[in-house]
Image (spheres, rainbow, N blue to C red):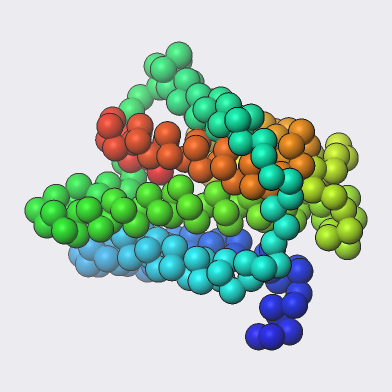
Amino acid sequence: MEQNAKSPLAAYVAPFAVFMGGLALVAGVAAVGKGSGNFFLIRPEFWVYPLQTLLCGGVLVFYWRRYDFGRAGGFALAAVAGIVALALWLLPQVLIGLPPRTEGFDPTVFAGDPALYWLTVVARFARLVVIVPLVEEIFWRGFLMRYLIREDFESVALGAFSPLSFFGVAGMFILVHAMPDWPAAFLTGLLYNGLMVKTKSLAACVAAHAITNLGLGIYIMATRQWGFW
């Protein structure tokens, strides 16, 4: 484990691998549990996501000193980028009149138990606003944007630009999102990439992503459109 702790590749990739493993586990358990009648096999996201949050948080803490978050500052621009990205996700539904996305991670299944309901909501927001921005920004813009320029990615400055890394990362960013969200995910990827190039700050990108996700979470709770989680 000590050797892995010294590996920059492991530090930047391990949290993302754990995160993706959680998504794969949800899909696998749901496929096996289909028709079983057991709620936690049919809807494994209600226990896998909290576990995924804890595991990713642990990996991030373990590798924390390895991360280069870049320049301090750029947070005003990050706030603007975060709000613009939120608009990219929500405006198509408003402007085109797409049907509500009510199917998804619905914490009201625990409405009869207030303690479990709020524990579920808090855990979901912790994942959405803390873990996802850190894991994804460390991987996509802290690692992959630089790796696509040079294999020795730590020798590449944060925010370095090349067409392959800039547009390639935005293209791959859509793959961790549902197909209906691909256009918004691609544009958001370009926006966050541009923020990185402009600010040279991974911290600013994490902040922008967190702002987007916080706004999205509030919208989801207000409209009960659980399909946006």
Question: Which image quarter is the N terminus in?
Answer: bottom right
Question: Which image quarter is the C terminus in?
Answer: top left
Residue depicted at x 27% and y 66% = 40
Residue depicted at x 79% and y 48% = 158
Q: Position of residue 35 (x, y in %)?
A: 26, 62
Q: In the figure, 104 relative to 30: above or below? A: above
* Left or right side of 29 for 199: right
* Left or right side of 68 for 42: left
Residue depicted at x 44% and y 63% = 53
Residue 3 visible (yes or no): yes
Residue 148 visible (yes or no): no
Residue 218's image quarter? top left
Q: Position of residue 88 (x, y in %)?
A: 54, 26
Residue 46's image quarter? bottom left
Q: Position of residue 4 (x, y in %)?
A: 71, 80
Q: In the figure, 212 relative to 55: above or below? A: above
Q: Could you say which is closer to the camera, residue 32 or residue 116?
A: 116
Q: In the figure, 186 relative to 138: above or below? A: above
